[in-house]
Image (spheres, helix red, strand yellow):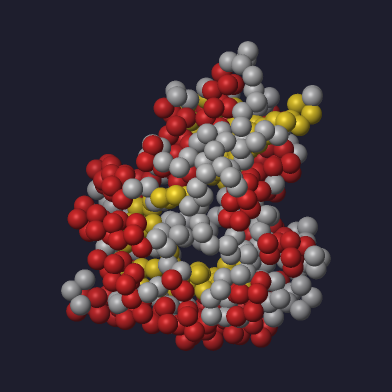
C-alpha cells in the first residue's frame, strides 16, 4: 500500500522539516518491512504546492498524519484540502491524537485515530486494511463510521525495546542533516519518570496504567549497534545527541551505557540532564563517555512558576549548582526557558533574565509557553482561569505565548523573548564546538585533555 505520511510539526529556527522522530521512525521501519511504499513530508503550516507535489509523486492509497498539539490548525487546513481533491482514507496519530482522540477524529476526513505508541496499533491496523474482509477493530485505534464511535482499549506496552527495529532515517533527510551539523540523534528508551506540569508525559502514562512498565530503556549494546549502522552509512557523523529526557536518571543503566559508549564510539556526546539530578558521581560517569554539552530545563527564574505550577521540585540554588558543576567539568550548557507561563509577570521575566545572567549558559533555547492538551497546567490554572484563547496556536507560531493573561500580555512576552535572544547565544545549528564564539570553553577542554 502506498502511504503518504504528513509530519505536522512546528518549524524551529534552525531545524528543517521533516524532523527526525524516533517513534515515528520505528513505525516507518515496521511498515516498510511489511511492503508498504512510504513517502514522508513535513509541514508546519498549510502549503498547497508542497501537498500537491507529494500527491503527484506518491499517488497514495492512504494518508497518515502525525500531528503535534501546536499544529492542529495546519493539520485541519491540510486535511480539508486533501478532502477536496482526493477520496483517501486518513488516519491520525502522534502527540495530539493521543491526548485528544475524539477531537482528532473530528478533523476533516479522519476515519481512524491511533493512540499512544504506534508499534502495536498502526502496523496491525494498516495490515487489516489490506484485507477488506478482516475486522477493522484494532487495540489502540479509535474508529468512526456509520455505526458510531469505536474506542478499543490500548494494547500492552512493548517492554523489550531491543525487539524493535532501528528507526528509519533517510525519509527524514538524515544525510542532509548530518552533512550540515554532523550530529546523530538517537533515542535510548521510552517513558519518563518525571511528572512536570507542562509535559504531556503524565497523560500518556495514565493511558497505559496497568499495561506494562512505563520507563523502558534499550540495552547499551543495542543503542551502540544503531549508532554503528548510521556511522557506516554516513561518514559525516561527528557527534551524538541523546534525545531522552530520562537518559541519565538510572545510575546502573547509565554506567553500563557510558562504558560501552566509550569503548565502541567515543564521539562527543550531548544529552538532557535534570538539574536536581546532577551528582558528582553521575557527572564523572558521563565524562567517561566524552560528554560535551548538556540540555538543562531551567524553564523559569521564578521558583513559584517552576515548582507550584510545573511541579519540577527544583530550586534556583540547585540549578546554579548544576551549571557550576557542568562548567567546571568543561561541559557546555544549553538552558531551556519558557516565557509567558501561567502567572508570568514582568517581575518574573526579570527573575528569569537575572538567573540566566548568573548561570551564564553556553546558549539559551527560549520558547513561548503553550498549554499542551492533557497537561496539568493546561487545565489548572489555564483553563480554570479562562486564559486559553482561540488564537493560541497562531500566537505560538508568532513567538508569543498560547495563553492570554491580563497581567502579562503576549506582546510583553514577545519582547522578553527578543531581549533574551539578543543577550544570549541562541544559535542551534550544529554542535557548539564548531562555533568560534565558544573558543574559550573549548580551549579549557583541550587543556584538560578532552
**Depth check, front residue: 25 or 400:** 25
**Residue placed at 61% from the left, 70% from the top?**
311
Q: Quadrant of residue 382?
A: bottom right
The answer to whether 421 is drawn above or below residue 252 in the figure is below
Q: Quadrant of residue 369?
A: bottom right
**Residue placed at 52% from the left, 34% from the top?**
120
Q: Residue furthest front?
A: 210
**Residue placed at 50% from the left, 36% from the top?**
119
Rendered location of residue 185, percent (x, y):
38, 53
The answer to whether 266 is drawn above or below residue 62 in the figure is below
Q: Is residue 428 visible?
A: yes
**Depth check, front residue: 162 or 26:** 162
**Depth check, front residue: 329 or 442:** 329
Rendered location of residue 207, percent (x, y):
63, 46
The answer to whether 144 is drawn above or below residue 251 in the figure is above
Q: Is residue 80 visible?
A: no
In the drawing, does residue 411 fall left or right of residue 115? right
Rendered location of residue 23, percent (x, y):
48, 44
Q: Residue furthest top?
A: 133
The answer to whether 7 is drawn above or below residue 389 in the figure is above
Quadrant for the C terminus, please: bottom left
Q: Quadrant of residue 404?
A: bottom right
How many numbered callouts? 0
In the drawing, does residue 124 fall left or right of residue 425? right
**Residue placed at 28% from the left, 71% from the top?**
284
Rendered location of residue 176, percent (x, y):
37, 48
Amino acid at each position: 500500500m502506498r502511504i503518504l505520511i504528513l509530519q505536522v510539526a512546528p518549524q524551529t529556527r534552525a531545524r528543517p522539516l521533516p524532523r527526525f522522530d524516533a517513534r515515528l521512525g520505528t513505525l516507518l521501519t515496521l511498515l516498510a518491512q511489511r511492503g508498504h511504499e512510504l513517502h514522508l513530508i513535513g509541514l508546519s503550516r498549510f502549503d498547497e504546492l508542497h501537498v500537491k507535489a507529494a500527491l503527484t509523486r506518491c499517488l497514495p492509497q492512504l494518508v497518515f498524519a502525525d500531528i503535534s498539539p501546536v499544529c492542529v490548525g495546519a493539520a485541519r487546513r491540510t486535511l480539508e484540502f486533501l478532502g477536496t481533491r482526493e477520496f483517501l482514507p486518513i488516519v491520525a496519530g502522534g502527540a495530539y491524537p493521543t491526548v485528544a482522540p475524539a477531537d482528532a477524529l473530528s478533523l476533516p476526513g479522519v476515519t481512524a485515530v491511533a493512540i499512544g505508541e504506534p508499534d502495536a496499533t498502526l502496523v496491525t491496523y494498516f495490515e487489516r486494511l489490506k484485507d477488506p474482509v478482516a475486522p477493522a477493530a484494532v487495540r489502540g485505534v479509535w474508529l468512526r463510521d456509520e455505526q458510531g464511535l469505536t474506542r478499543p482499549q490500548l494494547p500492552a506496552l512493548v517492554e523489550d525495546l531491543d525487539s524493535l527495529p532501528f528507526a528509519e532515517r533517510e525519509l527524514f533527510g538524515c544525510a542532509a542533516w548530518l552533512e550540515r551539523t554532523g550530529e546523530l540523534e538517537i533515542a535510548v528508551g521510552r517513558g519518563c519518570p518525571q511528572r512536570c506540569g507542562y509535559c504531556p508525559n503524565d497523560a500518556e502514562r495514565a493511558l497505559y496504567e496497568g499495561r506494562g512498565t512505563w520507563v523502558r530503556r534499550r540495552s547499551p549494546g543495542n543503542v551502540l549497534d544503531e549508532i554503528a549502522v548510521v556511522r557506516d552509512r554516513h561518514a559525516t557523523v561527528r557527534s551524538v545527541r541523546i534525545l531522552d529526557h530520562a537518559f541519565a536518571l538510572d545510575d546502573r543503566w547509565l554506567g553500563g551505557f557510558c562504558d560501552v559508549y566509550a569503548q565502541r564510539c567515543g564521539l562527543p556526546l550531548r544529552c538532557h540532564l535534570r538539574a536536581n539530578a546532577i551528582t558528582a558521581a553521575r557527572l564523572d560517569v558521563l565524562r567517561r563517555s566524552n560528554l560535551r554539552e548538556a540540555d538543562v530545563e531551567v524553564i523559569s527564574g521564578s521558583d513559584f512558576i517552576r515548582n507550584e505550577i510545573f511541579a519540577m521540585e527544583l530550586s534556583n540554588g540547585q540549578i546554579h549548582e548544576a551549571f557550576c558543576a557542568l562548567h567546571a567539568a568543561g561541559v557546555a550548557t544549553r538552558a531551556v526557558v519558557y516565557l509567558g507561563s501561567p502567572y508570568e509577570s514582568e517581575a518574573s521575566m526579570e527573575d528569569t533574565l537575572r538567573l540566566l545572567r548568573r548561570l551564564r549558559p553556553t546558549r539559551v533555547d527560549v520558547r513561548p509557553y503553550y498549554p499542551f492538551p492533557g497537561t496539568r497546567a493546561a487545565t489548572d490554572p489555564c483553563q480554570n482561569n479562562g486564559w486559553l484563547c482561540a488564537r493560541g496556536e497562531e500566537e505560538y507560531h508568532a513567538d508569543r505565548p498560547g495563553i492570554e493573561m491580563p497581567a502579562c500580555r503576549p506582546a510583553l512576552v514577545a519582547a522578553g523573548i527578543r531581549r533574551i535572544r539578543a543577550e544570549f547565544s541562541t544559535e542551534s545549528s550544529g554542535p557548539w564546538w564548531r562555533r568560534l564564539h565558544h573558543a574559550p570553553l573549548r580551549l579549557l577542554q583541550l587543556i584538560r585533555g578532552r
